[in-house]
Structures are given as C-alpha cells and as structure tokens.
Amino acid sequence: MIEVLLYALLAGLGVAIVTGPLGAFIVWRRMAYFGDTLAHSSLLGVALALLFSINPTIAVVLICLVLALILVALQQQQTLASDTLLGILSHTSLAIGLVAMALMPSVRVDLLSLLFGDLLTVTIRDVVTIYIVGAIAVALMILLWKPLLAITIHEELARVEGVPVTAVRTALMLIIALEIAIAMKVVGVLLITALLVIPAATARRFSQTPEQMAIFASVAGCLAVLMGLSASWFIDTPAGPSIVLSAGILFVLALLKRE
C-alpha cells in the first residue's frame, strides 16, 4: 500500500512541477479555455485508443497535439472569435469521446476515473512517462522562455524585434497539449485546467518577477498534491478532486495577503 502511495506522490509532484510555469503562461495569456478544450479532447484520444487497441497515452498525446495545431490554424483564419471557436471544439470533442465509448459496449471503461482522475492507480510506467514528458516540456520552456515572455508582453513588438511569433505560440500550445495528455491520469479530464490555473493564480499574489511566479506556481501545485493525497489517504476522498480542492484552499488563503 505504501508503494501505491509513493507512486501517486511521485506522479502528482511530477505533474505539479511542470504545470507551474505552464500555468503561469496560461494565466498571463488568458488561455484557460484553451486548456479546457485540449483536456476535453483527451477523452476522444482514450476512445480511439480503445477502438484501435493502442496505448492510451500515445493516443491522447496525438489527439491533443493534432487539436492544438487545428486550433492554431483556425485562429489564424479569424472567421470566429477565439472563445466561440474553443467552446465549439471543447464540447464537441468531449461529446464525441463519450458517444464513441457508449458505442463500444464490449469495452469496460471507468468513466469516473477518466473524468476526475485516479491517482492511486498509477504504475511505475506512468511515473516514468510523466517525468520523461515533463523533462521535455521544462527543457522546451527554458529554451523558449525569453521569446514566450516577449510575445506575452506584446506580440506586435515581439514580431518587430524578430521573434517568430506564430512558431513560438504554436510551440507553447504543443507543450500544453503534451502536459495535459500526461496529467489526465492524475486529476482527470474535467480537472486538468484547474491544476494549471489555480496554482499559478495563487503564485501571482507573492511574485515580483515572471521567474518567481513560475517557481512559486510549481511550489503551490506540489503543496496541493501533498494536501490532496493526505486527504485521500486519511479520510478516503477521491484523489484528483482533493488535489484541486486543496489548490483552491491555497488560493483563498493567498487572497488574504495584502497587496
């Protein structure tokens, strides 16, 4: 039983460390709805994995990456407002995933664990996958940190200064897609965006620089994982929702800090 808790803790901390800096950019760029859209599409990835008998993680990563690229292309067309486009794709992809699973009666799926996560069922393979993908995401963010900050502050000015705005923005979306794909196991399809947004919003209250906010967001996420897992272990609450609730409590406490 201790081994199960250790794997859960390692997986949760691995996700929280990466969602910190990613969440900072999501908060700065007001991309929470984009995160929701990718999270909902991950359920479609699971359905396709079951249909074609392939690894669910690989299928979810591919679906999230493809949808991220589609979103970039559609946003550049500017035929619809971004929030409208995201709303359509978010709920459509979620509905397709649910309908596809309903059409496979021979396949047993724990829908609650997909929607809300099941951290206590992670394996050593899941932990290794989380840390490998997380290391790639962190390395890419470090490499693109200055261009990402430049386009976040002022896209037009960044373009004038020679920053490849479209490429950098696409890279950010792809990194978010990767992290959402591996975070699904921890907090589930419906709660992933909360783990991205809430710790970053909490860190904002204590940060003076972008780098501080990225680090503090990771720390807040790790604290939420520790608190949520403790609640799950001692009072038998679901792990994913407990982590998100813990993040929410930390945010409320942060609001008490005077500016």
Image (tube, rainbow, N blue to C red):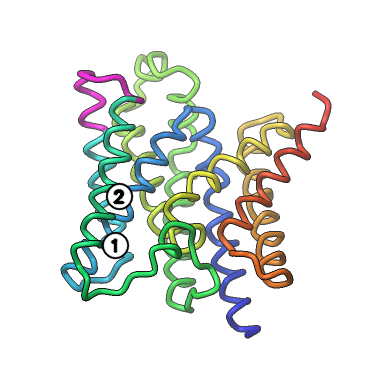
Q: CA distance from mark 1 to mark 2?
A: 11 Å
Report the disc number at residue 94.
none
Identify the residue at image location x=33%, y=53%: 42
- Pinpoint residue 152: horizontal percent, then vertical percent: 47, 25
On the image, which quarter does residue 73 sit in? top left
- Pinpoint residue 154: horizontal percent, then vertical percent: 45, 17
Q: Which residues are magenta?
A: 72-83
- Pinpoint residue 121: horizontal percent, then vertical percent: 50, 75
Would you say the magenta stretch is mainly helix, strand or loop?
helix
Determine crowd level at label 1: few under 14, some 14-19, many 20+ residues with C-alpha closer than 10 A. Answer: many
Identify the residue at image location x=68%, y=38%: 202
Q: Secondary structure at mark 1?
A: helix
Residue type at numbered disc 2: Cys
Q: Secondary structure at mark 2?
A: helix
Residue 81 magenta: yes
Q: Are marks 1 and 2 in contact (CB under 8 Å)?
A: no
Which residue is disc 2 drawn over? 64
Report the disc number at residue 46.
1
Determine crowd level at label 2: few under 14, some 14-19, many 20+ residues with C-alpha closer than 10 A. Answer: many
The quadrant in which the N terminus is found is bottom right
Residue found farthest to the left: 52
44 versus 34 height, above or below: below
Nearest to N terminus: mark 1 or mark 2: 1
Q: Nearer the viewer, residue 200 or 207?
A: 200
Identify the residue at image location x=30%, y=49%: 64
Residue type at numbered disc 1: Val
Q: Is residue 239 left or right of residue 148?
A: right
204 versus 61 height, above or below: above
Q: Is residue 66 left or right of residue 112?
A: left
